[in-house]
């Protein structure tokens, strides 16, 4: 049976076969199944060595030092640890946070929870291209600001923020540590934790052909001459320098380490190939007319294309391509209704176009045939729905 | 979102989509694209009998599927009501309760279309 063409790589990616093989080596009786915290025997020591190799691989890919890597279950946990950890540790210094309306829910929801607990949060609105400008951040910083959280690559539009410029603003302020959600960045955009000047950075494995359930928070030990402090969120074992208690899942971090190593050593031609396919996809969809590209292509990663289709209803569009094409929408979808994408709304798209958008996520295993199929499937669905809806264009 | 088999069948085929023309055709519409649902029915009625019906619909798969079903099953004596109640259609198509407002738009469009035929 033919499976639908998979163009949802911004949601998750398949595990690279090389990564899966490395993970399997950590599971069975013949593999390195020991507890990496058990220093008293060879099994534990071998697992510990694998964990530290993985830590070095992640650090090398992200431009960090291995001692700045704290394993987590994914970017969501990393975001929570960064936001709650900083907010609570520095609560006597201030209770104000700056972030953007276009952040992932894994940042917005912790911020809203902190608001319920008495913190104040300023939500910045991007320009129509999706960019947050450093002067916006500067204007939002207050004497009691303890944290700024701005994502590197937006998960819906692929727009890349100028993190180094924002970091410079935060550094000038002095007290506002900068957290960056970089879940979408690895393998898609150059990332150098040290050079960017961020204090904290969240990473995810499954966006880059690693396993789900693995991630890391980079915690700077050198920014502004002093390490960043966090209040831990969980306790019971003291692993990860006391910041993230719990036995480290050797197979998960080994998978993440290799996935990051493969991303770091991938030839530039891979990104170039994907960029060419994305433009081919856009050209094919644009030919339909009434199509709007969301996010500034000059400031976005090559793997993401977000398009709104005039004259069609979003839920019906997804239903019309089902079984043939796996794509995503930024619309909040529950069992009963859909809300327009809050990210596209923040960019100034009207509600109808925000609700009728599709996000195409290209990846390592995407081929030109997939792109041609996607164009044909979407073209057929959009044309049919426009006819059904009496859309005259 | 999960859809019933019936919903997907009518959504996919959408038989009866289109418009009718002629002096014996009556048109009614309701809703708006801004609301997220818009439906239009054309009915051809003679001697108190609806002989043909067509629809256009902008909306979710439930809106399109129910509109298609109504156009198919609405033939026969003209009366100012859907061929099946909104409650009945909700159950037939397993429409979530929060989306039943869409069926009221379908009902309003149908009633507006047949109203012309009733007035004749």
Image (cartoon, helix red, strand yellow):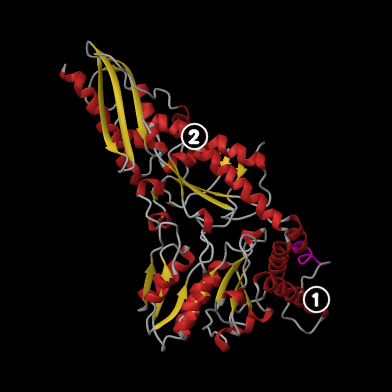
Disc 2 to disc 1, how far (Cα)? 54 Å
| x and y percentages locating residue A57 in the rendered image | 72, 71
User: Which residues are drawn in magenta?
Assistant: A23-29
* Left-right relation of A340 to A8: left
Residue that badge 1 annotates: A46
Chain ID, mark 1: A
Mark yes or no: residue A271 visible.
yes
Do the dots labelled 2 and 1 sit on one chain? Answer: yes
Q: Residue furthest top?
A: B47
Decide whether residue A181 is among the magenta residues: no
Query: A155 and B92: which one is in front?
Result: A155
Decide whether residue A25 is among the magenta residues: yes
* Left-right relation of A155 to A349: right
Foreground: disc 2 or disc 1: 2
**Quadrant including the C terminus of chain B:** top left
Secondary structure at badge 1 equals helix
Query: Label 1: how many residues lie within 10 Å, few (<14), some (14-19) or many (20+)?
Result: many
Q: Identify the mark nearer the N-term, 2 or 1.
A: 1
Decide: is B21 above or below B17: above
Residue that badge 2 annotates: A381
| x and y percentages locating residue A358 in the rendered image | 49, 46
| x and y percentages locating residue A91 in the rendered image | 42, 85
């Amino acid at each position: 049976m033919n499976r639908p063409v998979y163009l949802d790589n911004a949601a998750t990616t398949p595990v690279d076969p090389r990564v899966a093989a490395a993970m399997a080596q950590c599971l069975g009786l013949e593999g390195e199944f020991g507890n990496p915290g058990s220093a008293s025997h060879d099994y534990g020591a071998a697992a510990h060595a694998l964990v530290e190799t993985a830590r070095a691989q992640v650090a090398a890919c992200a431009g960090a030092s291995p001692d700045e890597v704290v394993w987590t279950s994914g970017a969501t946990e990393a975001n929570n640890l960064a936001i709650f950890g900083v907010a609570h540790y520095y609560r006597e210094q201030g209770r104000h946070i700056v972030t953007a309306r276009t952040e992932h829910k894994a940042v917005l929801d912790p911020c809203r929870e902190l608001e319920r607990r008495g913190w104040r949060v300023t939500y910045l609105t991007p320009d129509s291209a999706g960019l947050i400008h450093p002067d916006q951040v500067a204007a939002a910083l207050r004497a009691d600001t303890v944290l700024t959280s701005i994502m590197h690559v937006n998960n819906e539009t692929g727009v890349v923020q100028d993190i180094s410029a924002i970091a410079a603003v935060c550094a000038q302020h002095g007290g506002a540590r900068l957290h960056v959600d970089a879940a979408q960045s690895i393998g898609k955009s150059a990332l150098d934790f040290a050079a960017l000047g961020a204090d904290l950075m969240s990473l995810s494995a499954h966006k880059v052909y690693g396993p789900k359930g693995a991630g890391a928070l980079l915690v700077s030990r050198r920014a502004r001459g002093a390490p960043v402090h966090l209040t831990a969120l969980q306790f019971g074992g003291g692993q990860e320098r006391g910041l993230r208690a719990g036995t480290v899942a050797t197979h998960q971090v080994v998978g993440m380490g290799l996935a990051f190593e493969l991303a770091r050593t991938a030839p530039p031609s891979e990104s170039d190939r994907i960029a060419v396919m994305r433009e081919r996809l856009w050209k094919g969809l644009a030919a339909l007319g009434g199509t709007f590209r969301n996010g500034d292509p000059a400031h976005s990663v090559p793997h993401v294309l977000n398009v709104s289709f005039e004259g069609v209803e979003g839920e019906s569009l997804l239903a019309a391509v089902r079984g043939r094409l796996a794509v995503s929408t930024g619309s909040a979808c529950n069992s009963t209704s859909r809300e327009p994408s809050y990210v596209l709304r923040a960019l100034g798209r009207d509600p109808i176009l925000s609700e009728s958008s599709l996000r195409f996520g290209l990846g390592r295993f995407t081929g030109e045939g997939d792109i041609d199929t996607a164009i044909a499937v979407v073209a057929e669905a959009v044309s049919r729905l426009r006819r059904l809806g009496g859309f005259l264009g | 979102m999960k859809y019933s088999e019936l919903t997907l069948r009518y959504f996919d085929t959408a038989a009866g989509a289109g418009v009718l023309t002629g002096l014996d055709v009556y048109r009614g519409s309701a809703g708006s694209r801004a609301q997220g649902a818009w439906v239009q029915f054309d009915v051809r009625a003679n001697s108190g009998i609806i002989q043909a019906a067509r629809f256009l619909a902008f909306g979710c798969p439930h809106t399109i599927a129910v509109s298609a079903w109504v156009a198919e099953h609405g033939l026969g004596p003209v009366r100012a009501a859907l061929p099946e109640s909104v409650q009945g259609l909700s159950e037939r198509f397993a429409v979530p309760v929060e989306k039943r407002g869409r069926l009221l738009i379908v009902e309003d469009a149908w009633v507006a279309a047949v109203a012309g035929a009733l007035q004749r």
